Amino acid sequence: LLFPAIASWLALAAAAQAAPYLGMAHPWQLGFQTPVTPVMKQLYGMHDFLLIIITAITILVLLLMTFICIRFHRRHNPVPSKTTHNTRLEIIWTAIPILILVAIAIPSLRLHYYMERHEEADLTVKVTGLQWYWHYDYPDHGGFGFDSYIKKDADLKTGDIRQLAVDNMMVVPVDSTVRVLITGADVIHSWAVPAFGVKRDAVPGKLNETWFKADRIGTFYGQCSQLCGVGHGFMPIAVNVVSKEDFNAWVKQKQGESGIVPAVQTQMNQALKPTTPSAPAAATPLAKPEAPAKNETPQIEREEKNSQEKGEGKPADDAKNPETPQDDSDEDKPADDQHQ
């Protein structure tokens, strides 16, 4: 009976390896999902490191309390000690927690800065959270985009996972650094994929950034991790990690559906376009400055002449203008004397 059991177990293991990997929680799973990115692997290691420390602290405290309860029981210690201070003991229980916190802080800060650093990305995907679905844009590949809705129960097919399957998955290539720009269009959402170690809020009016590099082909699921309304529980996230060849084929398909001509193809068409050499243009001789005509009067002389003509005609104009003051005539003087 032992050999058939081992053979069946090996067959199941081989079938599991051949089947597409599903990055999701499984029944009776203990611990995190299997990490597939450098960030999640370090988070997994940090979790195990902290688990060891907290287990050691718990066991130490339990042993000390057990020793105190037995050693200082009234049957074994009828006369209690009246000691109030112990300098050596106080230094020990102050220094040891400080050393433990320093041992936790150093790898924690190192991991924090590793998660937040901006590596040179192979492609960029912009994620927009809406009520209650996700929108994905690929600005590095012509800017095409699509919506991702949860599949209803009536639309589920064989192999689809209820409450996690979507109609359009986000597709990325394996072993490639993906920069993810995350924002919201209405309320605050949160884009989280546990197997990637990614969880970043989608805030309206703000563009958050994170990154991941998946080293395994498969489909990885997540969910919105921020209360965003009545449909919060129906915003699954599905990321399909494929080979680079399959990713390029998928990009061409999406570009064709969106009517986008790849930039590389456009450059190739321009390079292959036949060009006819044009004849060199004939040199145009420089134009010589034209000599002024003999009968042409310079502009300054014309202006002076006009001003002189106006000056000669000024008395006539004054005679016509009644408001122009005139000198008193001799006929008016006797009348003035008589009046005086």
Image: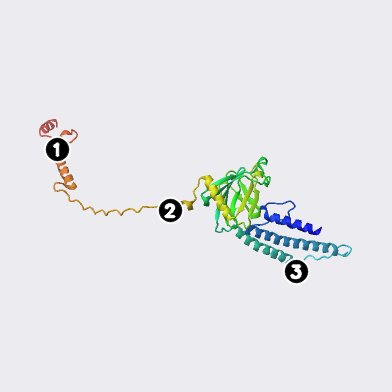
Q: Is residue 145 visible?
A: yes
Residue 21: give x, y in percent of width and height: 66, 53
Q: Secondary structure at mark 1?
A: helix
Quadrant housing the N terminus: bottom right
Q: Is residue 207 visible?
A: no
- CA–CA distance in space, label 3 to label 1: 124 Å
Q: Nearer the viewer, residue 205 or 136?
A: 136
Q: Secondary structure at mark 2?
A: helix
In the image, taking residue 94 as reference, residue 319 lies left or right, namely: left
- CA–CA distance in space, label 3 to label 2: 85 Å
Mark 2 vs mark 1, foreground winner is: 2
Badge 3: residue crowd in 10 Å (few <14, some 14–19, many ≥20): few
Q: Secondary structure at mark 3?
A: helix
Q: Are marks 2 and 1 in contact (CB under 8 Å)?
A: no
In the image, taking residue 270 as reference, residue 23 lies left or right, namely: right
Number of numbered discs:
3
Residue at image coords 67%, 55%:
18
Q: Earlier in the sequence, mark 3 or mark 1?
A: 3
Residue at image coords 10%, 32%:
331
List the residue tagged with mark 3. 88
Q: Nearer the viewer, residue 177 or 95?
A: 177
List the residue tagged with mark 2. 272
Residue at image coords 65%, 52%:
220
